[in-house]
C-alpha cells in the first residue's frame, strides 16, 4: 500500500519536503486555507482546511486514513500535527509538549518552573496589566505576540511610553490575543540560530549558526544565518546539555527542532525559542550543503516512523549562509544591485519580485523578496559581508 502523508501548509518554504515525499512515491495531501499556495500543485490532493483548526484537520486525517503528518517550518501548525499524530497513534511528539514549545508564554513558564535561565517575562491580555509589569522590569524590553512566527509583531522598546503602540501591534499578530512583555538580556557575541534533530529522544544532530539582523531597517527580523557559529565549544556544549534536559522533561522523541538562543555577557545560556519544527530561511538547505545531513528527508521519514539513524552529528565544512533579500524602504521594485565579488559566492538564489512590483520595508518574514545561499572563502569575509550586506546585495526601490 502506498503511504499517505498529510502536509500542513504548501507555501514556497514548505515545498522541499513535499518534493521529497513525491520522489519517494508517497501519496501527498496538502491542506491550508490558501488555495493559491504553490505546493498544492505538486500534491495528489488538496483540502481547504486551516492548519490551526486541529479538530478539522483530525477529521480530515481520519477520513483520508493518513500514515504520517508534517508541519514543516510552521510554528502555528506544529501543535496541530502533534494533536493529530497523538489521536491517531502516528509517529510524533506529545501534544502538550509541542504546545509548550510553540507558545512563548507557556514556554517561558515551563523554563522558569524547571530551573532554566530565563528572562523576566510575563504575558498579558490587558495593556493595563502589562504596564504594571513593565514598571517592574523597566526598559529596554521586548514586546511580542505569544504565538506568532517569523518575528512578526515584535518590537523592542526603549521608553515606557512606547508600550501601548507596541502592545497593540503585537495583538494584531496573535491568535490568542495575548502579548509577552520581556526584559532584554545583554548578549555576548551573536544570537544563535540553526536546526537540530531528535532520534529516539536524543538530540542526535544540531547545526548552529550566528544569526544576523539588518541595522538599517528592522533590527529584530533575521536576514540570514552564518554557519558555523563563532561561539566557543564550552558554551555550545552547555547549550547541547540544556537542550537535552529540556527534551527529556518534555518527553520529545522524534523530529526537527529550530533554535534561537543566546549567551549573556557572564556566559549564561538562555533559550529564546525552541521551535518543534524545521527552520525557515533555507536553514535545512544550508545545513545540507554544510554537513551532508538532509533534515528535509529526515522530517518526512520520521513522520512515517522510518529509521532515521543516518542523522548523526557532523561538523560544518566551509563557511555558508542563508540570506533574505529585502528592501530598506517602501516603494516600487526597480532592480537587485549585486557587487562584483558577490556572484562567485552565491550558490543558489530565488527572487520573488519583478520590476514595478510593490515592496515594503522589511519588518517580518512576510516581507522577504527572495532567498539566497552563499559560500564564503573565510569566517572573516562571511561575517563582514553579511553584517554589511547593503554593500554587496541591495534592493533598489523607487519611492
Image (tube, rainbow, N blue to C red):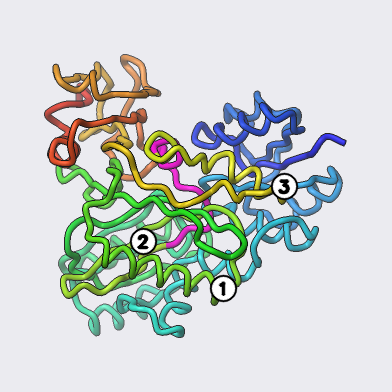
Foreground pick, 187 / 135: 187
Q: Which residue is mark 2?
A: 168
Q: Which mark is residue 120?
A: none
Magenta residues span 274-286
Q: Earlier in the sequence, mark 1 or mark 3?
A: 1
Of the two numbered discs 3 and 2 in the rendering, the one whose residue sits closer to the viewer: 3
Callout 1 secondary element = helix
Callout 2 secondary element = helix
For the residues labelled 1 and 3, the Cα–Cα distance comes to: 21 Å
Of the two numbered discs 2 and 1 in the rendering, the one whose residue sits closer to the viewer: 1
Q: Which residue is mark 1?
A: 250
For this view, does 295 lie left or right of residue 396? right
Percent position of residue 127, x then y? 36, 73
Percent position of residue 195, x then y? 43, 51
Q: Residue at x 34, y 76 (%)?
A: 118
Please tell me whether residue 77 is drawn above or below residue 365 in the rendered image: below
For the residues labelled 2 and 1, the Cα–Cα distance comes to: 32 Å
Amino acid at each position: 500500500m502506498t503511504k499517505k502523508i498529510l502536509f500542513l501548509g504548501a507555501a514556497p518554504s514548505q515545498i522541499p519536503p513535499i518534493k521529497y515525499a513525491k520522489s519517494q512515491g508517497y501519496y501527498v495531501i496538502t491542506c491550508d486555507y490558501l488555495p493559491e499556495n504553490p505546493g498544492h500543485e505538486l500534491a495528489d490532493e488538496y483540502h481547504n482546511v486551516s492548519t490551526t483548526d486541529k479538530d478539522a484537520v483530525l477529521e480530515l486525517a481520519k477520513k483520508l486514513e493518513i500514515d504520517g503528518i508534517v508541519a514543516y517550518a510552521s510554528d502555528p501548525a506544529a501543535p496541530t500535527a502533534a494533536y493529530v499524530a497523538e489521536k491517531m497513534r502516528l509517529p510524533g511528539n506529545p501534544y502538550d509538549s509541542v504546545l509548550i514549545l510553540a507558545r512563548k508564554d507557556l514556554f517561558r513558564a515551563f523554563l522558569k518552573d524547571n530551573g532554566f535561565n530565563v528572562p523576566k517575562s510575563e504575558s498579558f491580555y490587558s495593556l493595563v496589566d502589562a504596564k504594571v509589569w513593565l514598571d517592574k522590569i523597566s526598559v529596554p524590553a521586548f514586546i511580542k505576540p505569544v504565538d506568532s512566527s517569523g518575528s512578526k509583531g515584535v518590537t523592542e522598546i526603549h521608553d515606557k511610553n512606547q508600550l501601548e503602540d507596541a502592545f497593540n501591534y503585537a495583538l494584531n499578530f496573535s491568535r490568542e490575543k495575548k502579548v509577552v512583555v520581556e526584559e532584554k538580556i545583554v548578549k555576548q557575541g551573536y544570537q544563535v540560530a540553526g536546526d537540530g534533530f531528535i532520534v529516539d529522544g536524543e538530540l542526535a544532530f544540531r547545526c548552529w549558526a550566528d544569526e544576523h539582523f539588518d541595522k538599517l531597517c528592522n533590527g529584530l527580523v533575521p536576514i540570514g544565518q552564518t554557519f558555523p557559529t563563532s561561539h566557543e565549544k564550552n558554551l555550545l556544549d552547555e547549550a547541547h546539555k540544556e537542550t537535552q534536559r529540556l527534551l527529556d522533561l518534555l518527553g520529545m522523541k522524534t523530529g526537527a527542532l529550530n533554535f534561537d538562543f543566546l549567551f549573556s555577557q557572564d556566559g549564561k545560556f538562555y533559550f529564546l525559542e525552541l521551535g518543534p519544527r524545521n527552520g525557515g530561511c533555507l536553514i535545512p538547505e544550508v545545513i545540507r550543503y554544510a554537513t551532508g545531513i538532509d533534515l528535509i528527508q529526515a522530517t518526512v521519514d520520521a513522520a512515517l516512523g522510518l529509521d532515521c539513524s543516518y542523522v548523526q552529528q557532523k561538523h560544518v565544512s566551509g563557511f555558508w549562509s542563508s540570506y533574505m533579500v529585502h528592501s530598506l524602504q517602501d516603494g516600487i521594485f526597480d532592480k537587485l544591485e549585486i557587487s562584483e565579488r558577490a556572484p562567485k559566492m552565491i550558490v543558489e538564489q530565488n527572487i520573488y519580485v519583478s520590476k514595478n512590483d510593490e515592496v515594503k520595508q522589511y519588518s517580518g518574514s512576510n516581507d522577504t523578496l527572495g532567498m539566497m545561499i552563499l559560500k564564503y572563502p573565510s569566517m572573516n569575509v562571511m561575517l563582514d559581508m553579511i553584517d554589511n550586506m547593503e554593500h554587496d546585495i541591495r534592493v533598489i526601490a523607487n519611492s
